[in-house]
């Protein structure tokens, strides 16, 4: 264990007295020059790094430390997507699930202040529906204005289907909204006809090719306007096998040409129970391997985001967790006032921890690059903080990294149906589905694991180890590879 280790729980409960007086160590920059979302301070202009360094979606590194929250103030939408059921949140930025609690801008302000006082990791307020945040503009704007007045340093982030976006770009720029997500599933309106049955634009409903043509033109215009104003854009694309999967390579190139900062290719979530057109007609989503193959094929184009959790329109917390249920309206006081102390203190501790992490991982990745052979996939149980710090039985998802002679790179996450540990005993059915979820994974690294799940996974050909508990993730993976795969590398599973 690293001597400077600071657990996430400690980070959450820090007070000003815990902060040392010396200045944080200077980061040497990460040696891994991979995709933009995992890029570090040395990989981009200082002003861009300043905008993304605390944004958990725009920086893969930041998502270990910082949290976002969404407020569901924008229920109305102006288009229909075949993967959406209006009973649920916007599937462009949230998984279909339980309907969000809709908020007025005043209620949203109270909720954001309450969360900021209790969740020191909070860095970003996003509006991601549950409809379209640009179409339901008055409420989105009123919320941003009220929150940025109360908490001036919070980053504002918005997600939209793009149809109404060009009408609001100037106001977004005026409000210092630095981050805009546009969902772009096609740049060929013919393909659009298989995704969008209709749009509502200029007081009229359009269908067929005309609808997709208008949507496409408005999305491109909006993206170009944002780029011209220096606003960072992330493009979300839903990967729909047989509809737009191959086409997303063209989308990647086209959005890069127009200045997109990141491209987030998300798997279609399709289930008949959700009542969507795709769910009811049996359209399947991609497998983990298909998604990774497409993402790898886009390498060299627009930088890829691979750590998206397709979170709900009322999500609260680090990307892998959702604390939304702790902050429902009935739990929020009528009168609130913002106290910056916790967030300020947390940031100081994180700055120190993060600099140490960057240095340590640079060394670990260099060691691996010098010795590694065949690539392997390693799944990590983590509660955040960039460490292997969660028990196997408590994990509801695993973060997946590829270790190879190219270094250690984040490739995605695998959600499990349920945590294996069910309050003192292990659930065998859960273990079976966890093993299926971990298909293609060589090893799982966690803070602790019992003999029973360890043996079961071993029978399925997956190594589980708690020997690297509490190390930084990249160091744990590098050490695992060098100690336990090393000479056996040719037999390692191909990623
Ligand atoms: Fe929210 Fe989206 Fe802003 Fe992030 S989410 S509006 S950019 S603050 Fe993030 Fe969630 Fe993925 Fe979105 S993990 S669904 S990419
Ligand atoms: Fe649904 Fe979002 Fe598409 Fe509107 S933009 S139809 S809310 S997925």
Image (spheres, rainbow, N blue to C red):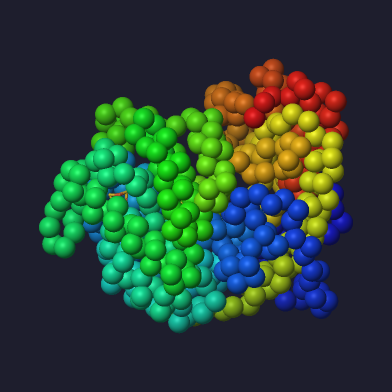
Residue 175 against residue 54 in the figure, above or below: below
Residue extending furthest toward the front? 257
How many marks on residues? 0
Residue 295 against residue 303 in the figure, above or below: above
Give percent across and percent down for residue 16.
72, 76
Give percent across and percent down for residue 379.
66, 36
Q: 146 left or right of 280?
A: right
Tell me the quarter of the picture where residue 43 sits: bottom right
Q: Quadrant of the C terminus?
A: top right
Please tell me which residue lies in front, 428 or 141.
141
Q: 19 left or right of 379?
A: right
Q: Is residue 428 visible?
A: yes
Q: Is residue 415 visible?
A: no
Q: Residue shown at 33%/62% (left/top)? A: 221
Please tell me which residue lies in front, 258 or 51.
258
Q: Residue shown at 60%/29% (left/top)? A: 438
Q: Residue shown at 52%/51% (left/top)? A: 302
Q: 159 left or right of 377?
A: left
Give percent across and percent down for residue 473.
73, 46
Residue 293 against residue 28 in the figure, above or below: above
Q: Residue shown at 73%/24% (left/top)? A: 492
Residue 360 against residue 483 in the figure, above or below: below
Give percent across and percent down for residue 33.
69, 52
């Amino acid at each position: 264990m690293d001597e400077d280790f600071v657990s996430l729980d400690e980070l959450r409960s820090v007070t000003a007295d815990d902060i040392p007086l010396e200045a944080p160590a200077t980061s040497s920059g990460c040696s891994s020059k991979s995709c933009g979302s995992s890029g570090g301070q040395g990989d981009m202009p200082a002003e861009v790094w300043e905008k993304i360094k605390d944004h958990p979606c725009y920086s893969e590194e930041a998502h270990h430390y910082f949290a976002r929250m969404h407020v569901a103030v924008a229920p109305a939408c102006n288009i229909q997507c075949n993967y959406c059921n209006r009973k649920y949140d916007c599937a462009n930025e949230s998984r279909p699930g339980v309907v969000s609690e809709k908020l007025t801008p005043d209620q949203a302000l109270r909720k954001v202040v309450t969360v900021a006082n209790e969740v020191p990791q909070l860095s970003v307020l996003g509006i991601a529906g549950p409809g379209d945040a640009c179409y339901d503009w008055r409420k989105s704007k009123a919320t941003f204005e009220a929150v940025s007045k109360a908490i001036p340093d919070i980053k504002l982030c918005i997600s939209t289907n793009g149809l109404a976006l060009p009408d609001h770009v100037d106001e977004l720029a005026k409000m210092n909204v630095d981050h805009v997500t546009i969902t772009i599933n096609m740049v060929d309106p013919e393909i659009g006809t298989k995704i969008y049955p209709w749009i509502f634009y200029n007081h009229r409903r359009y269908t067929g090719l005309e609808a997709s043509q208008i949507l496409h033109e408005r999305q491109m215009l909006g993206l170009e306007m944002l780029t011209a104003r220096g606003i960072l854009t992330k493009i979300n694309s839903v990967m729909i096998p047989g509809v737009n999967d191959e086409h997303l390579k063209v989308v990647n190139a086209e959005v890069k040409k127009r200045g997109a900062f990141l491209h987030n290719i998300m798997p279609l979530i399709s289930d008949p129970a959700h009542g969507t057109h795709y769910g009811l007609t049996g359209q399947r989503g991609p497998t983990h391997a298909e998604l990774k193959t497409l993402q790898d094929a886009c390498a060299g184009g627009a930088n890829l985001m691979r750590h998206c959790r397709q979170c709900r329109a009322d999500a609260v917390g680090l990307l892998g967790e959702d604390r939304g249920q702790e902050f429902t309206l009935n739990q929020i006081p009528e009168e609130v006032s913002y106290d910056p102390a916790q967030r300020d203190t947390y940031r100081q501790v994180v700055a120190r921890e993060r600099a140490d992490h960057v240095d340590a991982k640079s060394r670990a990745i260099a060691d691996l690059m010098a010795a590694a052979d065949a690539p392997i996939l390693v799944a990590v149980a983590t509660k955040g903080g960039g460490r292997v710090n969660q028990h196997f039985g408590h994990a509801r998802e695993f973060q997946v990294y590829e270790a190879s002679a190219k270094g250690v790179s984040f490739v995605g996450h695998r959600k499990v149906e349920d945590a294996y540990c069910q309050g003192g005993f292990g659930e065998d059915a859960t273990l079976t589905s966890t093993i299926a979820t971990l298909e293609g994974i060589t090893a799982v690294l966690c803070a602790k694991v019992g003999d029973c799940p360890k043996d079961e996974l071993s029978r399925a050909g997956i190594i589980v180890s708690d020997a690297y508990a509490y190390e930084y993730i990249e160091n744990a993976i590098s050490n695992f590879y060098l100690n336990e795969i090393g000479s056996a590398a040719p037999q390692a599973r191909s990623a």
